[in-house]
């Protein structure tokens, strides 16, 4: 369904069209309150990011309207602005807390830990999502913003892995990020941490080799990733000493954990048909789980319209299309609820395995032996 309210011929979409996606800004005062006030406030950012939006999803339902995918970038000024301002805002938040927390005598050990996790919720559920949007753009400034956000959580190689490996090999055994059928999150998580790092480095190395350059050539983006991460660690030490470094690292760990939880949900059990000779069918909307839940799509800037993102990776987030069950498999809940259930393998399998089996029967009734698609090799 296309929303007829806006057209690509318009000079600029009105601010009201973008405002729901600016809800993420409310996380900033909540994280600040958790650090300044302590006590109950230390869990408020965590509850707000996932509990509140899960509740709003239940109350507001689905959004099935689509903007015209031909809408020009010039019409998306207010949508793009939130992703552009987030990197400096997150930088100030993280390193402001790195300076403040070691000096906050009112915060106990548990409170300090939860404040740090709350900061990781902000840099993970918002910062990494925005970085994902930015790294897909051709504009160098936006790509740099994406790099800054990813390296603020010590996961800079994600850009190389995502663009060179995940989008190319999604739904195949060569993609570490595609969660296999029956694979629990707790098995997926250590596998993907190792697999993403190795596959991203190999991808960049191989690109350089095709240009007859060694992996250590200055154009290898890993030098940028390592340089930025080292600079951020040094800055954390200068601002907060070793406790400041610990705060910085723990928020990064919390952010990465959320990222990989979402990655686990997005493609669980979905595979592309093998055509022989190592070739697979083209990526289609059916190869990613789709979710049209309104509130969590506001919070995650339409990340849950993941079926369209893999089908058309160059589309900016406001233009991502949602699909019904005829074209893409549907998650029963938005990511806030699905990532919670992903932590409990037995509950997850009971919820998702029947859906994967139904997906197989619907799209690939001719395949009788799925064993080759279930191998856990990266």
Image (cartoon, rainbow, N blue to C red):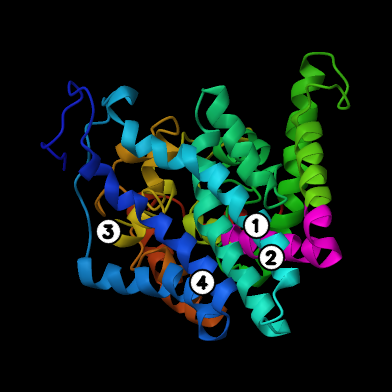
Which residue shows up at 86% across the image and 27% down it? 215
Is 244 included in the stretch rendered in magenta?
yes
Measure the alpha-carbon separation of dots 4 and 2: 12 Å
Measure the alpha-carbon separation of dots 2 and 3: 36 Å
Which residue shows up at 38% across the image and 66% down it? 355
Q: Which residue is more in the foreground, 11 or 370?
A: 11
Residue underneath mark 1: 96
Residue underneath mark 3: 294
Residue underneath mark 2: 100
**Mark toward the viewer: 4 or 3:** 4
N-term-proximal mark, 4 vs 1:
4
| Residue 12 locus on image (x, y percent) | 23, 27
N-term-proximal mark, 2 vs 3:
2
Q: State which region is magenta.
A: 236-260
**Mark toward the viewer: 3 or 1:** 1
| Residue 166 locus on image (x, y percent) | 59, 41
Residue underneath mark 4: 33
Measure the alpha-carbon separation of dots 3 and 1: 32 Å
């Amino acid at each position: 369904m296309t929303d007829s309210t806006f057209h690509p011929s318009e000079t600029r979409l009105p601010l009201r069209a973008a405002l729901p996606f600016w809800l993420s800004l409310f996380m900033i005062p909540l994280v600040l309150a958790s650090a300044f006030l302590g006590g109950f406030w230390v869990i408020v950012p965590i509850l707000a990011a996932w509990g509140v939006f899960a509740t709003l999803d239940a109350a507001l339902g689905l959004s099935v309207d689509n903007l015209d995918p031909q809408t020009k970038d010039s019409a998306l000024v207010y949508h793009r602005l939130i992703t552009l301002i987030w990197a400096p805002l997150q930088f100030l938040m993280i390193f402001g807390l790195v300076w403040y927390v070691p000096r906050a005598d009112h915060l106990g050990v548990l409170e300090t830990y939860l404040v740090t996790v709350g900061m990781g919720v902000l840099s993970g559920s918002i910062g990494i999502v925005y970085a994902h949007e930015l790294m897909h753009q051709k504009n160098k400034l936006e790509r740099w913003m994406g790099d800054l956000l990813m390296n603020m959580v010590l996961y800079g190689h994600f850009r190389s892995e995502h663009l060179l490996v995940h989008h190319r090999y999604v739904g195949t055994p060569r993609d570490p990020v595609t969660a296999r059928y029956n694979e629990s999150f707790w098995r997926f998580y250590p596998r993907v941490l190792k697999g993403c790092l190795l596959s991203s480095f190999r991808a960049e190395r191989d690109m350089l080799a095709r240009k007859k350059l060694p992996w250590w050539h200055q154009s290898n983006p890993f030098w940028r990733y390592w340089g930025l991460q080292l600079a951020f660690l040094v800055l954390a030490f200068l601002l907060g000493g070793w406790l400041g470094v610990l705060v910085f690292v723990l928020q990064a760990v919390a952010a990465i954990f959320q990222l990989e939880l979402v990655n686990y949900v997005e493609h669980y059990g979905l595979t592309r048909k093998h055509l022989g000779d190592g070739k697979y069918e083209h990526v289609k909307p059916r190869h990613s789980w789709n979710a049209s839940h309104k509130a969590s799509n506001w919070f995650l800037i339409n990340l849950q319209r993941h079926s369209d993102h893999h089908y058309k990776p160059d589309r900016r987030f406001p233009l991502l299309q949602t699909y019904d069950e005829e074209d893409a498999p549907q998650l029963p809940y938005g990511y806030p609820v699905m990532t919670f259930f992903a932590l409990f393998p037995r509950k997850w399998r009971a919820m998702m395995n029947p859906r994967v089996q139904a997906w197989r029967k619907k799209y690939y009734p001719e395949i009788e032996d799925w064993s080759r698609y279930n191998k856990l090799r990266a």
